[in-house]
Amino acid sequence: MKQTSVLILIIFLILCSCSQEKKKTEFTQTNELSQKTQDIVSDLIEYGEITGSAVGYSGGKPKQWDNFTELKKNATEQELLLLTEHPNPVVKCYAFDLLVKQRNKNSFNILKENLKDTTTVSTQYGCIGSMTRVNDYFIESMSRPYPDNEYLTESDKRALDSLILFTPNLISNYKNRLLEKIEPKEKYYDRIRELALKGNNSAIIAISKYQKTSDIELINNLLNNEDTDIQFYGLKAVKNFPNENSFEYIKKIHSIEIKKPTSFNYAMLRELYQSIVNYKNGNSRILLEKTINESDGYTKQYHSEFIWLALKKYPNEIYNGIVEQLNYTESEIADLESEWSWQIE
């Protein structure tokens, strides 16, 4: 009998918990929306993702674009403000988009209030589908340039970046991109190092810009990892801080990669050679010539391409003659310049 009572109590607590959770995800302000807006919101939720005006290989207009257009035509500013509190991320993001386009004065505060909203939302633009977090979607929406001018002032951007950097336990792709491009100002160092010690690999790229020997171990830990996706971050850090201690790890990575016949991590290889040429010394030249002389087949083909790209981005007289050893024709070089123009500029 006692066991039965305990079981009933557990079930009751679970039901109460579920009920509380349901309350958290209910939109309690539906009655403040017009019936037309309610119907549009239902259609947005039913479709279930954010789209552009054309999707798929055929470039057809999706029904969701019509739904979004209807929301734009019919929802009032007050309704849009209410909908930024909607539990459905599709509705929430569309409402925020429209407020930003209308240059609503509350948009920046709404963004700040939603910095920790990591709910994921599906997007589809043309043939490209992906998942993003609500906070990243909001940041991108507000950072997007509009025909007249950008929404955020330079002061707003600095305030937002500082908020993103110092908000505890913030999960955001924008935060990682910010860390990788941030200038090494002393006022940021302690916070960046804190993030690096907590395992944020982008923070290790950021901290490498300070070129402090006390941070070399953090870089080398990434280089010493067997996962090439993690090595990628270490190599990007070395580009900022080409120190001799890390060079030993780079030589090890290089010796492994030039023996691989396939299964290349192209992004990592790109960073490998860019980190090598930033050393600008005889030992780094030896590694480049070792690739040319000891690799073959597809390995030599792809590695040579990344050597060419690295020297195009970071030329130095110590590497004179290396490009000629790659034996590219003028036509092949023209193709490379076309393919990698986005990296070279």
Image (tube, rainbow, N blue to C red):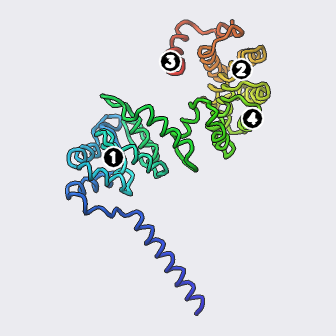
Q: For the residues labelled 2 and 1, say whether their Cβ atoms are less than 8 Å apart.
A: no
Q: Position of residue 257 (x, y in %)?
A: 71, 28
Cα–Cα gap, marks 1 and 4: 43 Å
Disc 4: CA contacts within 10 A as few (<14), some (14-19) or many (>=20): many
Residue located at (45% from left, 42% from top): 130
Mark 1–mark 3 Cα distance, whole angstroms, equals 34 Å
Q: Say which label, 3 or 2, has the lower sequence index.
A: 2
Which amino acid lies under the numbered mark 1 shown in the image of this protein? Tyr
Of the two numbered discs 1 and 4 on the same chain, state the one appearing first in sequence.
1
Relative to 190, does residue 211 appear above or below in the rendering? above
Which label sits in the foreground, 4 or 3? Answer: 4
**Residue under circle 2?**
295
N-terminal-most mark, 2 or 1: 1
Q: Is residue 136 left or right of residue 284?
A: left
Whole-Å distance between the Cαs marked 3 and 2?
26 Å
Mark 3 in CB contact with mark 2 (< 8 angstroms):
no
Nearest to the eye among marks 1 and 3: give it.
Answer: 1
Tag 3: amino acid: Ser
Q: Which residue is mark 3?
A: 341
Q: CA distance from mark 4 to mark 3?
A: 31 Å
Type of the residue with mark 4: Asn
158, above or below 32, in the image: above
- CB contact under 8 Å: marks 1 and 3: no
Q: Which residue is mark 1?
A: 94
The crowding category of the residue bearing disc 2, from other C-alpha atoms within 10 Å (few below 14, some 14 to 19, many at least 20), is some
